[in-house]
Image (cartoon, coloured by chain):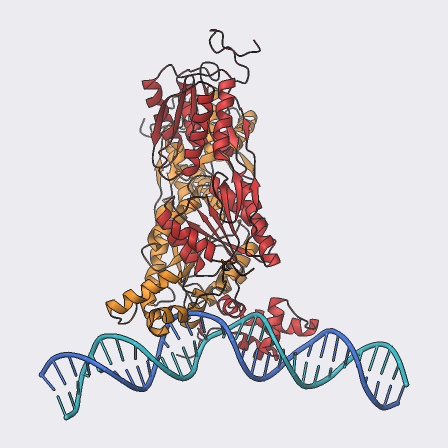
Chain colours: A orange, B red, C cyan, D blue
Amino acid sequence: MTLSDPPRPRKPLTLRDVSEASGVSEMTVSRVLRASGDVTAKTREKVLEAAKRLGYVPNRIAGGLASQRVNLVGVIIPSLSNMVFPEVLSGINEVLENTPLQPVFGLSRYDPPHEEKVLFEMLSWRPSGLIVTGLEHSEATRAMLRAAGIPVVEIMDLDGEPLDSVVGISHRRAGAEMARAIAAAGYRRIGFLGTKMPMDHRARKRFEGFTGALARAGIEVADHEFYSGGSGLATGREMTRALLGRNPDLDFLYYSNDMIAAGGLLYCLENGIDIPGRMGLAGFNGIELLDGLPLKPATMDIQRREIGRRAARIIADCVARGLSGAGERVALTPRIDPGDTLRMAPPRTDGQDRPDHV
Amino acid sequence: MTLSDPPRPRKPLTLRDVSEASGVSEMTVSRVLRASGDVTAKTREKVLEAAKRLGYVPNRIAGGLASQRVNLVGVIIPSLSNMVFPEVLSGINEVLENTPLQPVFGLSRYDPPHEEKVLFEMLSWRPSGLIVTGLEHSEATRAMLRAAGIPVVEIMDLDGEPLDSVVGISHRRAGAEMARAIAAAGYRRIGFLGTKMPMDHRARKRFEGFTGALARAGIEVADHEFYSGGSGLATGREMTRALLGRNPDLDFLYYSNDMIAAGGLLYCLENGIDIPGRMGLAGFNGIELLDGLPLKPATMDIQRREIGRRAARIIADCVARGLSGAGERVALTPRIDPGDTLRMAPPRTDGQDRPDHV
DNA sequence: TCAACAGGATAGAGCAATCCCCTCCTAAGG
DNA sequence: CCTTAGGAGGGGATTGCTCTATCCTGTTGA
């Protein structure tokens, strides 16, 4: 019965075990493992060797409790199902990897009550900093963020009142800029295709900026088509079919993201629609998927990775300098990439709405 | 100076604060917040009210230390940059949301030493369970996983020796099955396009299974093309161009993932190659991107979401029942979806390799 | 010889959970 | 109506593991 050693003694290793194994005090072991304080190279060696031999893994639970600080940075994003947020995470990772900080992710699902729950959960771990998506939060969420006493960075969006720091772009302006480019290119009968925007505030702001700028150019959105659920090529295709079915004379299609734009593009090409002559189209995000399509859809790059990097850097700075907030505002400027689907020189010849310089 | 209340008192709230505010003992507050033990509705009410009013967030650091247990499940995946792992995460999330457990993600970047580091970091939080990707780990990683004394599920792959539980598919078999389907359809001059597989063991196993099964049918891979870096449509396009440039007489292209398969498909269509008549092609993964392309590439669905669900369920079961491992083996069977690019009836007429039933 | 200092030891804090106990209320039986 | 047993509700003391602050020792150099 007792012939074979129990393979898993299941007695948790502690600092004491390491200290006994290496013949020094727990204190010294702690100093070695934390790389703080003065310890001779020989002692350090001895301790590290013992730790490795025993397979000791420091207990951050106890460590965090004792030191009242924890090297975690909470990151709350709406979803992982389109490519934009994974890239933001990459940017965050990239920066934090050179610091003692470690990111922890949570998903809000574009749902404020759920965001609230996730945030509560995160705060219960007393992180050193938080990165949250967008500026719109429930009152309780805002209260928690304020009360946390740690640096908070709101990312992706600039249009609103930040709680502390903010890194992103103005979606209103992005929409407006695209509208101006479209108008300047001579397109006049414009259709919009995008998500039902109950909670995607950034898509909504883009739409507002878009229609506003069009209005200033004396143009109205001729028709629109909304969808809910996942964004895929098929969605874009189907929406485009529906919209063009109703409105065959549209000459521009503005999509709220690149994925559905790509679907729309494929639909148009298959149906022999001349792009960008007879019809222009544009998406949003600048996802790399676009390289490789028969034509490259016009889009705007929002520098997702850079957003992550900048946000992480703010947090890292605050933590390093012991600040509980920075109040920084980092405004990135997305640029239009006309690709192959937005003619930049307006070839209109029918006289109406003729551009000035013709 | 002192007119306005200091907005951030910055004194951390503890159970004691709540207990004082509600006039009961810390003990009782703890019971209420943990929903354990008997507390009258009135007392509960009082406590909850006080907690809410103060904005108290329980300290899991202290809680974890006291109870010697923490409701975290570590999840280590290689990357977020293709759609497969985000979907696995969704599956995990879906199951864990109905439990007290909470997932924590880490990225291994297909790099064993980095995986080791991430795992170490995770274990320092003493999670209740772990989900890791693949069966190939460094010796130190395996040692840590064994010594952790918690349930471990290795996901995605079945071909190898699991440490504890395993959920996935046999990539070797998946590759072999696709090879058989291709051979049965009458294709003979087959090209392979995929990642350089220094560390993507699953892609390698698929390739091995693929070539092995082809060999049994008396066929060899005629040519191949490898790439490194991100998978995008452009990559697939470029690789296909290169391969067909060298080998114009190939009649089938097998890609190691759907993204590059889609790029290759677009290339072929643009160049007027008859698919699936003159040339067939297939990818791997069954990503939803495929719906919406001009033709739907053949692929195999590996049920990523289901893998996540099953893995999470195993962990949840173990935690609920206090087990430190389950040793379960869940084998999922991917199925071939021929799409539009793998003709299922072989129309060959040149006599050689003619199928029996003609 | 003494001061200064590096290296190492000791004690206690940090917050919540657990174990064990007490109190008070209720209900049943005498 | 009183007594008492049982149970539910609530409290006190202790524990978990590490880090911080403080203190002590031995050594070195002037």
| Residue A42 image position (x, y, % from top left) | 25, 68
Q: Nearer the viewer, residue B254 or A144?
A: B254
User: Residue A280: which quarter of the image?
Assistant: top left
| Residue B65 image position (x, y, % from top left) | 50, 69
Q: Nearer the viewer, residue A222 or B8?
A: B8
- Report how many numbered discs are placed on residues in the image: 0
User: From this viewpoint, is residue A288 visible?
Assistant: yes
Q: Nearer the viewer, residue A147 or B204?
A: B204
| Residue A107 image position (x, y, % from top left) | 50, 51
User: Residue D29: which quarter of the image?
Assistant: bottom left
User: From this viewpoint, is residue B298 visible?
Assistant: no
Residue B338 to residue B7: above or below: above
Q: Tell me the quarter of the image containing the C terminus of chain A.
A: top left
Residue A334 to residue A271: above or below: below
Q: Tell me the quarter of the image containing the N terminus of chain A.
A: bottom right
| Residue B210 image position (x, y, % from top left) | 45, 27
